[in-house]
Image (cartoon, coloured by chain):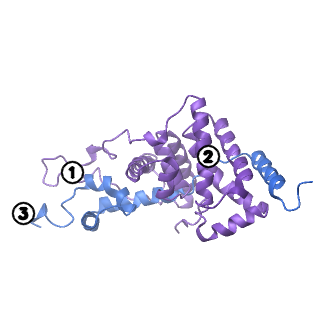
Chain colours: A purple, B blue
Amino acid sequence: MTADSSVRSAPRPAGADEGELLDRLRRGDETAFTTIVTGWSPMMLRVARGHVSTEASCEEIVQETWMAVIRGLDGFEGRSSLRTWVFRILTNLAKTRGVREARSVPMSSWAPADDGPTVNPNRFRPADDGYQHNWTPVGAPTPWLPGPEQSAVAGETRRLLGIALQELPERQRTVVTLRDVHGMSSDEVCATLGLSAANQRVLLHRGRARLRAVLEDYYRGAGVETS
Amino acid sequence: MTEGTRSSATGLTISCQEVVELVTDYLEGELDDATRAELEAHLALCPGCGIYLEQMRQTIDELGHVPVESLSEQAQNDLVAAFRTFHAPGTGT
């Protein structure tokens, strides 16, 4: 049985429900507030991490953001989505803090730094071969059995992915986490991080390719029992 | 298949090494029509690349289940308390 992709941690952008959500918040609906704090704070922590160096600073920035949201809610005019507005507050606070901590790495300057192949070139046939640049027999990927979503290995594959995510270069980690862990859209990630669509895709591609390779190493190396 | 048709046959004008660098653009729906058709033709012929693509999808799916960090429970409770102070109906006493 395949894991259901609807079991994701983060709520999707509110869309048509946005107006209702805003009404509930303005009426003082604590459940609505708790829902967005719970749902959005993990993403906000990750975005903040791109600007400041410590977990404690990230948490403070996210808390400050929510306090600003609480105070500004009645004045919010709804020209952008609520979530966009919240993330804009967050980004402004994080940048200010980042400058103060002298760790300012403006995300707008995030050109993809690393290039080169994402799969070891040794796994493909050489250029003078009739089937140049296609998989060699040994290099070709083999199916993962049991699949990473299967209960026998799901705990371990997710643990490995969590570790591997932390080891990705910061920009790849942020993009992959927002897109694939939190389910943000590419448009929202680009807007939040100030990235071009092309740069966002490069970072996503490199990060995902690295994580796939980590799982492949696990399957090839650890000799997963396929009893 | 003959030597002469191999390099120009549909699905074989791109190599496996190119396919693995196109998978994200493919999954994002960002390939132009001609490149997408070529890539899909390649996938239909090439088990290795089909497995690679499937593993990329599996990796993405599993990332959706990786535990995430959030604010401490105390911090979240403090925020809800602040929200209550500012917004609860009938407050201001």
Query: Where is mark 2, residue-wise?
Result: A90
Q: Amino acid at mark 1?
A: His
Disc 1 target residue: A133
Q: Position of residue A83 (x, y in %)?
A: 61, 57
Q: Position of residue A190 (x, y in %)?
A: 47, 52
> Amino acid under label 3?
Gly
Looking at the picture, do discs 1 and 2 lie on one chain?
yes
Residue that lies at the very extreme toward the left in this rendered image:
B4
> Residue at image x 63%, y 66%?
A18
Question: Given the image, what chain letter belongs to the residue carrying mark 3?
Answer: B
The answer to whether residue A38 shows anywhere in this view is: yes
Q: Amino acid at mark 2?
A: Leu
Q: Residue at x 61, y 54 (%)?
A: A85
Q: Tell me the distance, in whole angstroms, between the alpha carbons under discs 1 and 2.
A: 46 Å
Q: Which mark is residue B78?
A: none
- Tell me the quarter of the picture where residue A152 sits: bottom right
Q: Which residue is mark 3?
A: B4
